[in-house]
Image: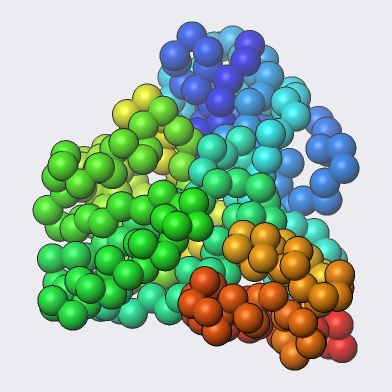
Amino acid sequence: MRGLVIKSTGSSYIVRLDNGSDAECHIKGNFRIRGIRSTNPVAVGDYVQVSLIEEGSPTSQRSDFTGEVGLIGWITDVEERRNYIVRRSTNLSKESHIIASNLDQVALIVTINHPVTSTTFIDRFLATAEAYRVPAVLIFNKIDLLTPQELLRLDELRTLYESLGYQTVAISAKNLSAKDGLSTILTGKTTLLSGNSGVGKSTLLNAMFGKEIARTGHISDAHNKGMHTTTFSEMFPYHGGWIIDTPGIKGFGAIDMKKEEVGHYFREIFQIGQQCRFGNCTHTNEPGCAVQQAVIEDKIAISRLESYLSLLGDCTESKYR
Ligand SMILES: Nc1nc2c(ncn2[C@@H]2O[C@H](COP(=O)(O)OP(=O)(O)O)[C@@H](O)[C@H]2O)c(=O)[nH]1
Ligand SMILES: [Mg+2]
Ligand SMILES: [Zn+2]
């Protein structure tokens, strides 16, 4: 039977079967996903094959089944993933941990103030999403707290990112309203929600799902901090799509970018960079650099060039590490 993995605790998974019921599943045998060295063979968002275990059979007595939902079963296979987001493991084995798969988009919660989210942080997120080839959207939160001047900053940033083709929305998670258009951005899509701590991710999830989140007995962020591999992720149905929450993971990890690739992940830099004199221009100090010229002419935001250069700097350093 086919199903969608909607919750992962590291050792067991809740699968929403195609017939609508949920099954608690473990992995049968040691199938390893072809081509990926990951610490977890199955992730939230995966479509899997499940073989249900009959009630009363010897296996159904196993203590590692918690009985959280009515049915239990084995995951016997994982369908090929459309895409996936990984976090590099902390160990040196080069293994990665798959956070979620089959995403339609990733959303970053951003605050102009309380706390300030830097444009570098936003741009790194967007560049990483580009590298994963997953569309990204920006959710500006806490607009109820903004001064007139900060509201201008909000407009400025929304205009910048929308001009680059990223959808944005401005909300107050404390007083969520149908008018703000959040549901429009999320309807029918599978969205991974991320954000720096303090930007209001928990508040937003609670506003969106109310008691449902509380009832599922989330491990608190504080408790989750000490756990490395048993990462807990969950997806919740929302407006015909899904919202994926990954408590304990602050956004997704930077993908391994090669220095010459960084420019590909900044849309306007990539586009205008085609006109640089040198094909391998890094837009740092080469003569005839169209990107540097575009910044002077205000056609590329200086903040975007700065973010690009900072990411480029990281890649250069890591070579010698
Ligand atoms: N005024 C205001 N406060 C908010 C809003 N969203 C979250 N907060 C507050 O910001 C703080 C951090 O929120 P929390 O949801 O815990 O952030 P998280 O770390 O991203 O999960 C809490 O005190 C929330 O009450 C908002 O839209 N407006
Ligand atoms: Mg939180
Ligand atoms: Zn250049």
Q: Nearer the viewer, residue 287 or 185?
A: 287
Q: Nearer the viewer, residue 271 or 248?
A: 271
Where is 210 relative to 293, above or below?
Answer: above
Q: Is residue 46 visible?
A: yes
Residue 242 appears in which quarter of the rendering?
top left
- Is 187 on the left-hand or right-hand side of 47? left
**Residue 139, percent from left and from top:** 35, 56
Q: Is residue 59 visible?
A: no
**Residue at the location (75% across, 90% down)?**
285
Where is 101 relative to 26, above or below?
Answer: below
Residue 284 appears in which quarter of the rendering?
bottom right
- Is 134 on the left-hand or right-hand side of 23? right
**Residue at the location (84% across, 87% down)?**
321
**Residue 87, percent from left and from top:** 66, 60
Q: Nearer the viewer, residue 146 or 69?
A: 146
Applied colour scheme: rainbow
**Residue 250, percent from left and from top:** 49, 66
- Is 45 on the left-hand or right-hand side of 119? right
**Residue at the location (13% across, 76% down)?**
148
**Residue at the location (42% across, 65% down)?**
160
Where is 296 relative to 214, above or below?
Answer: below
